[in-house]
Amino acid sequence: SRHACAISKSAEVACWGSNSSKQTGGSGAVTPAPRLVEGLGGVTELALGDSFSCALTRAGQVWCWGDYLRGGSSSAPDKPTLVPVPPATALAADSDMACALGRKGKLWCWGSTWGLVQSPPADGAPTKVALPGKARSLAAGPCVVLHDGGVQCAGPLGDELARAERPPGSWTAVKGLSSPRSLALSSSGGCAI
């Protein structure tokens, strides 16, 4: 849904817009003005899906609220819930899935992970996703920049790059792109610096 969040100078989070799945935190169907999300501090990064919001803290913890496990808005938490993943360095989300890159270069994803793993958990719980190498950064899609500078994508975007539907967990190299400083992606394409 249509919502936005921002990190304040004091490393807290405020969200506004549609709250149909509790993705702005608190109650009410709409949050017309930025509202502080209770219980969060030390936030360094945000990632938003259609019906959820997630935050990464300086300590490497990942917190999400709204329908981040794809269980429906009635079971979605309206306050940040700690996601059980190892300490993370990066966070990314697309419409119905979020991923965190662990400090050891491992990838964990939750929500709708079809196309990333052979047997996605029915409850949308975090699951480790096999990578084609050790990753140093992450973008929605998901796509990763590997330590060797290569960029690889999985899921629907990876299928688009390969111009074919591939088995779950397959990664496709982005040809002609090496060691980007930053990636920005949607479910159907992206840009890099």
Image: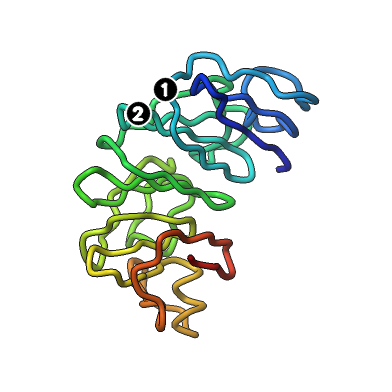
Residue nearer the viewer, 142 or 177:
177
Q: Give amino acid for label 2.
A: Arg
Q: Residue at x 75, y 25 (%)?
A: 31
Left or right relative to 67: residue 133: left
Q: Nearer the viewer, residue 62 or 176?
A: 176
Q: Is residue 132 above or below residue 119?
A: below
Type of residue at label 1? Gly
> Residue shown at 36%/70% (left/top)?
152
Residue 110, position as x, y percentages in the image: 41, 45
Disc 1 target residue:
42
Q: Quadrant of residue 151?
A: bottom left
Residue at image mark 2:
58
Secondary structure of the residue carrying numbered label 2: loop
Which residue is found at the position 50% from the left and 68% from the top?
A: 156
Q: Is residue 107 above or below residue 124?
A: below
Please report contact status of discs 1 and 2: CB closer than 8 Å, yes or no: yes
What percent of the width, then of the height, locates residue 72? Answer: 60, 36
If the image is split into quadrants, where does the N terminus sit?
top right
Q: Mark 1 falls on what kind of element? A: loop
Q: Residue furthest top?
A: 39
Q: Nearer the viewer, residue 138 or 67?
A: 138
Q: Earlier in the sequence, mark 1 or mark 2?
A: 1
